[in-house]
Image (tube, rainbow, N blue to C red):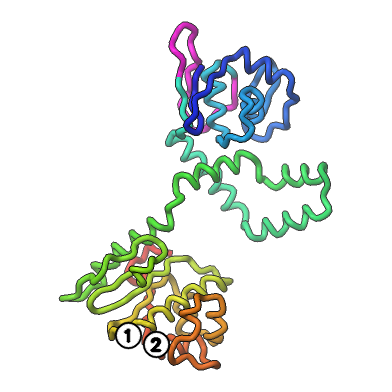
């Protein structure tokens, strides 16, 4: 049977699989398995042993489908249609590395289940402590108990592949939806807006019209937001540098960033300690000035986007 993995063609047959895998001891089964001559192997282990592809990335579901096509018994892929085994005398089936929608949905479900049941930061803190002083046996036990198995990694890889540009999509969609709600009569977009997350030298602000300059910060604040605070305040300072006389606005999500910019007593200069050099010494910033004082002095309006788009969070 011929298949394609990461753009390269390969060939595999049941006899080769049986011969090569027979010399390998099965690793412990965690979720998925393939049965080869009465022994159950993790699909990735068996696939690597059978093909010799130890450095090529692939997901468990891909290996399972290859084994199913070749007639081996495997654990089911939830939500996937049953794969018909290869029939002798018919042309080889060509499998690709593409994932079905069912596989993607299952990956989302798997990852969401783990993230919903585990606060990642505290989980990592506990895991780090458990690994201090651990040897091979102890680290193996910790790995099994942690839930960080190959299937979870598979799920995360699938989700990352599908939604790797999610922040950019959200940024673009929110700005696009917001414009009809805020543009005034006679106001026009002055320069091509920066819909993608981040700016470039030719587009200093996310939005420039003949009446306003604006930045959009769409991250969801949780309470411990030092990095987000620095990034948001840097945008406020950037807006203060515009001397065109247009309105200066920063759009945020929720009351936490609003309160930070309008009420925070955090020292403004120290908050900019990691900002780019051009932002560290803006005109009018005194040594003892707070974030809230500078925001007011700069005349930057702070707008909670949830008042315009209630579905944001």
Residue 263 in the image: state x and y as whole percent: 49, 85
Residue 229 in the image: state x and y as whole percent: 52, 75
**Tag 1 near tag 2, CB within 8 Å:** no
Instruction: Please report the bounds of the magenta region as a residue range.
Output: 73-93
Query: What residue does disc 2 label?
Result: 298
Residue 36 in the image: state x and y as whole percent: 66, 18
Residue 194 painted magenta: no
The answer to whether any part of residue 306 appears in the image is: no
Query: What residue does disc 1 label?
Result: 243
Alpha-carbon span between mark 1 and mark 2: 11 Å
> Quarter-wise, where is residue 207 in the image?
bottom left
> Quarter-wise, where is residue 70 in the image?
top right
Residue count near mark 1 (Cα–Cα under 10 Å), binned few <14, some 14–19, many ≥20: few
Residue count near mark 2 (Cα–Cα under 10 Å), binned few <14, some 14–19, many ≥20: some
Residue at 58% x, 52% y is 115
Residue at 41% x, 64% y is 198
Q: Secondary structure at mark 1?
A: loop
Out of 308 and 237, give the one closest to the viewer: 237
């Amino acid at each position: 049977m011929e298949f394609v993995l990461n753009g390269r063609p390969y060939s595999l047959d049941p006899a080769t699989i049986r011969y090569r895998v027979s010399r390998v001891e099965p690793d412990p089964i965690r979720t998925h398995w393939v049965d080869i001559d009465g022994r159950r192997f993790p699909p990735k282990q068996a696939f690597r042993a059978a093909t010799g592809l130890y450095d090529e990335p692939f997901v468990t579901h891909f290996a399972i489908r290859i084994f199913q096509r070749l007639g081996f018994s495997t654990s089911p892929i939830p939500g996937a249609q049953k794969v018909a085994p290869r029939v002798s005398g018919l042309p080889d089936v060509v499998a690709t590395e593409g994932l079905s929608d069912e596989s993607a949905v299952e990956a989302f479900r798997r990852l969401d289940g783990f993230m919903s049941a585990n606060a990642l930061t505290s989980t990592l803190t506990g895991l780090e402590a458990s690994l201090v002083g651990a040897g091979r046996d102890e680290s193996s036990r910790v790995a099994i108990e942690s839930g960080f198995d190959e299937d979870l990694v598979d799920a995360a890889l699938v989700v990352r592949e599908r939604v790797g540009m999610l922040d950019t999509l959200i940024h673009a969609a929110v700005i696009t939806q917001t414009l009809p709600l805020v543009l005034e009569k006679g106001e026009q977009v002055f320069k091509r807006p920066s819909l993608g997350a981040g700016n470039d030298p030719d587009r200093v602000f996310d939005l420039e019209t003949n009446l306003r300059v604006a930045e959009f910060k769409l991250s969801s604040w949780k309470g411990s937001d030092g990095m987000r605070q620095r990034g948001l305040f840097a945008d406020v300072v950037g807006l203060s540098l515009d001397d065109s006389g247009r309105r200066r606005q920063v759009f945020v999500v929720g009351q936490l960033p609003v309160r930070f910019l309008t009420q925070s007593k955090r020292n403004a200069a120290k908050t900019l300690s990691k900002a780019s050099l051009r932002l560290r010494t803006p005109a009018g910033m005194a040594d003892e000035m707070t974030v809230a004082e500078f925001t007011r002095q700069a005349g930057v309006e702070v707008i909670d986007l949830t008042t315009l788009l209630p579905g944001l969070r």
